[in-house]
Image: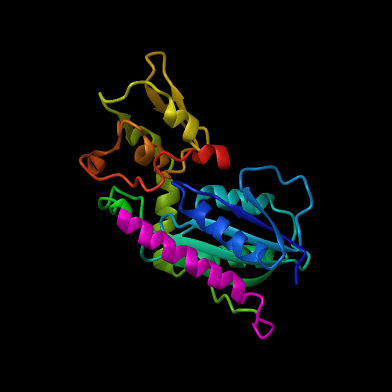
């Protein structure tokens, strides 16, 4: 049994953080101390013997910030680790790819899996209503607890992670990563914007600033997580014509996500 664990996460609109906290709760009930940390936090302290990595799937892969985190993460030296990605539909091989990266850095990866959660990607389709989202979130939290609890089965064999992404997923992910360079230019504020600055405060990367006219400006580093678009109090942000008139993913609306990162 492990004495301590640390779960690292990146969250866009709150789904991933909910999973990380649910997983931590399941271990704490077994007497294991768990620290839940944003991947953007400092890595100066020694990490414990059990590590979890949680993230949403973007373009069939991990968010760019997760890739950067993996490069900063200290060598595993035999520490055990697991990976949980989340997506609304096809996750590609995102979890496997991150698991392989951890393996190459000296971690013994015990799990690389994914959990279904509501989509916040309203460029493709409107977000589901909050009551339906609540059902999906509850099921996702239940599944992640089962996955983490199963890691302590003494008969659990170290999984075979297989090979990296197939050509289709690799190409789609490459396109997504390349497109991030241009993402900021597609975000715009509408006449509903009142200059409150909520988008500046909630941006996990800090890439949003206010202009001299108190309008948001998106700069370099945007991860295209859609937090600002979905959680703007005035629904005053659009990203191309494909978000106009679309229901936002507001399940976490009103919760100060930034304060708990």
Residue projecting furthest to the top:
212
Q: Can residue 98 be seen in this snapshot?
A: yes
**Residue closer to the observer: 25 or 89:** 25
Residue lying at 50% horizontally and 54% vertically, measured from the top left: 18
Residue lying at 60% horizontally and 48% vertically, measured from the top left: 68
**Residue closer to the observer: 38 or 187:** 38
Name the quadrant containing residue 174: bottom left
Q: Quadrant of the N terminus?
A: bottom right
Residue lying at 61% horizontally and 72% vertically, measured from the top left: 149
Q: Is residue 45 magenta?
A: no
Question: Taking 25 as reference, is 158 above or below it?
Answer: below
Residue projecting furthest to the left:
245
- Residue 191 in the figure: left or right of residue 151: left
Residue lying at 34% horizontally and 47% vertically, measured from the top left: 249
Q: Is residue 138 magenta?
A: yes
The spot of residue 180 in percent (x, y) is 43, 43
The spot of residue 254 in percent (x, y) is 41, 38
- Residue 120 in the figure: left or right of residue 4: left
Q: Can residue 207 be seen in this snapshot?
A: no
Which residues are the magenta region? 131-157
Q: Quadrant of the C terminus?
A: top right
Q: How many marks?
A: 0
The spot of residue 102 in percent (x, y) is 65, 63
Q: Name the image colouring.
A: rainbow
Magenta part, dominant SS: helix
The spot of residue 229 in percent (x, y) is 35, 38
């Amino acid at each position: 049994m492990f004495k301590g664990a640390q779960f690292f996460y990146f969250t866009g609109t709150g789904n991933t953080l909910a999973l990380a906290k649910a997983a931590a709760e399941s271990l704490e009930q077994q007497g294991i101390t768990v620290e839940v940390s944003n991947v953007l936090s400092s890595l100066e302290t020694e990490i414990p013997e059990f590590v979890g990595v949680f993230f949403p799937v973007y373009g069939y892969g991990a968010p760019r910030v997760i890739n950067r985190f993996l490069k900063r993460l200290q060598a595993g030296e035999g520490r055990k680790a697991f990976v949980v990605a989340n997506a609304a539909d096809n996750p590609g091989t995102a979890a496997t790819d991150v698991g392989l990266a951890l393996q190459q850095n000296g971690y013994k990866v015990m799990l690389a899996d994914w959990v279904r959660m509501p989509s916040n990607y309203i460029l493709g389709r409107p977000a589901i209503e909050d009551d339906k989202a609540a059902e999906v979130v509850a099921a996702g939290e239940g599944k992640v607890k089962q996955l983490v609890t199963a890691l302590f089965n003494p008969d659990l064999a170290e999984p075979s992670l297989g090979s990296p992404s197939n050509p289709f997923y690799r190409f789609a992910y490459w396109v997504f990563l390349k497109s991030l360079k241009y993402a900021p230019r597609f975000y715009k504020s509408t006449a509903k914007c009142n200059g409150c600055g909520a988008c500046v405060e909630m941006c996990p990367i800090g890439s949003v600033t206010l202009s001299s006219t108190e309008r948001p400006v998106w700069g370099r580093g945007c991860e295209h997580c859609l937090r600002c678009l979905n959680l703007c109090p005035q629904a005053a942000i659009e990203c191309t014509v494909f978000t106009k008139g679309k229901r936002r993913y507001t399940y976490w609306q009103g919760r100060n996500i930034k304060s708990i990162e």
